[in-house]
Image (cartoon, rainbow, N blue to C red):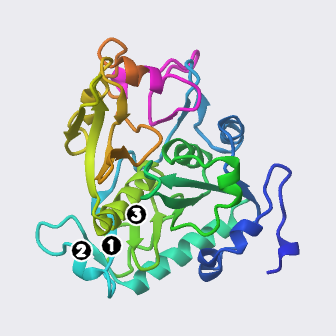
Amino acid sequence: MTMSQFAISRDGDDPSFLLNSAFCRDAGFEPKAVCRNLSPPKLYAKALAFEPNTQITSSGALATTTGNKTGRSPRDKRIVREPGFEDAVWWGEHSPNYEMDEGTFLMNREAAVDYLNTVDRVYVVDGYANWDSQCRMKIRVVCSREHHALFAHNMLIRPTKHELADFGEPDFVIWNAGAFAANKYHRYMSSRTSIATSLKHRQVVILGTEYAGEMKKGVFTLLHYYMPHRDVLFLHSGCNIGKEGDVTLFLGLSGTGKTTLSSDPARPLIGDDEHCWGPKGVFNIEAGCYAKCVNLQSESDPDMWSAVNRFGTVLENVVYDEQYHIVDYSNT
């Protein structure tokens, strides 16, 4: 398909930055229209126009639903077992890394790209992981849902206008076709959901789940592999800093209180979930927070309350009243 055959919507972007990418050529990506790094107001407008079950809450956040999958699917995650990478990955009994072969990964990627080629528009979010410029990695998210693009806009470190113009080839690509189900009859599959990571291809493919957190954990998985190769310790932790420059790390699994503990009004927050500890100190890998909202209260979590109840925030699977769209965090 030639460049002239690509339609550019009135608020779409010149797709040449995407079509000239080796990732796209290799995958056969031929989108109908491309919207790159849209602002939150534009993503709000498109979400309200095109996403079912999406509304603005009374506090200005964008509330939406994620279908059958309202949380992560750890048993549907796969790491491709590939020469040159497999010796550095923990496999076998008690390991959280379930393997997939390269052929199955490529079939899943083809299914994802085929789906993304059929939708009216795709959203591309180019951003960075890691605030330390020497460890910074370029991440490209390609998705079809507006709230996924807004999520990526919030969580990735946003490039300046000049950096975006010179972004070039990303280091990693996340193909998010979560609205399209995986083929559960392929080898290494356990359901119609699949989140597959290839270190060789430097890509993550998401099928069968619209839960936005899978993109965040995709970046987590990639950095968990690559950062130790740069002599940088990667940590699943919250982090804040005191008046004397004293840094505190709160390590723990999801749901154990990292966000709550690190959000101390007396200590500026560095980040609530994922950090690196390198030669120059501790740094966050993200730009935003992704917190659980169950029983959230302004009195006990004022920082998180303020972050959640504002324009630009994405709220997934929350309950709100139909008249005033006031969120009931006790029923979420």
Q: Which mark is residue 79?
A: 1
User: What secondary structure is the stretch in magenta mostly built from?
Assistant: loop
- Under circle 1, the secondary element is strand
Q: Which mark is residue 26?
A: none
The image shows residue 275, relative to residue 93, as above or below, that is above
Q: What residue is shown with label 2?
A: 89
Instruction: Single out the mark in the foreground, 1 or 2.
Output: 2
Q: Quadrant of residue 112?
A: bottom right
Residue at x-position 36% and y-position 56%? 220
Q: Earlier in the sequence, mark 3 or mark 2?
A: 2
* Left or right side of 260 for 92: left
- Where residue 269 sits in the image (x, y, percent)? 36, 30
Pick the residue in front: 181 or 289. Answer: 289
Direction left: furthest residue: 93
Residue 328 visible in the snapshot: no
Bounds of the magenta span? 306-332
Inspect the image, locate mark 2, and give the three-letter code of the amino acid beneath it. Val
Q: Looking at the image, do the residues carrying marks 1 and 3 touch, with CB atoms under 8 Å apart?
A: no
Determine crowd level at label 1: few under 14, some 14-19, many 20+ residues with C-alpha closer than 10 A: many
Pick the residue in front: 259 or 179. Answer: 259
- Where residue 178 sits in the image (x, y, percent)? 50, 59
Residue 254 visible in the snapshot: yes
Q: What residue is shown with label 3?
A: 193
Q: Earlier in the sequence, mark 1 or mark 3?
A: 1
The image shows residue 138, relative to residue 71, as above or below, that is below
Q: Looking at the image, do the residues carrying marks 1 and 2 touch, with CB atoms under 8 Å apart?
A: yes
- Where residue 154 sits in the image (x, y, percent)? 53, 41
Inspect the image, locate mark 3, and give the three-letter code of the amino acid beneath it. Thr
Q: Confirm whether the magenta stretch covers residue 311.
A: yes
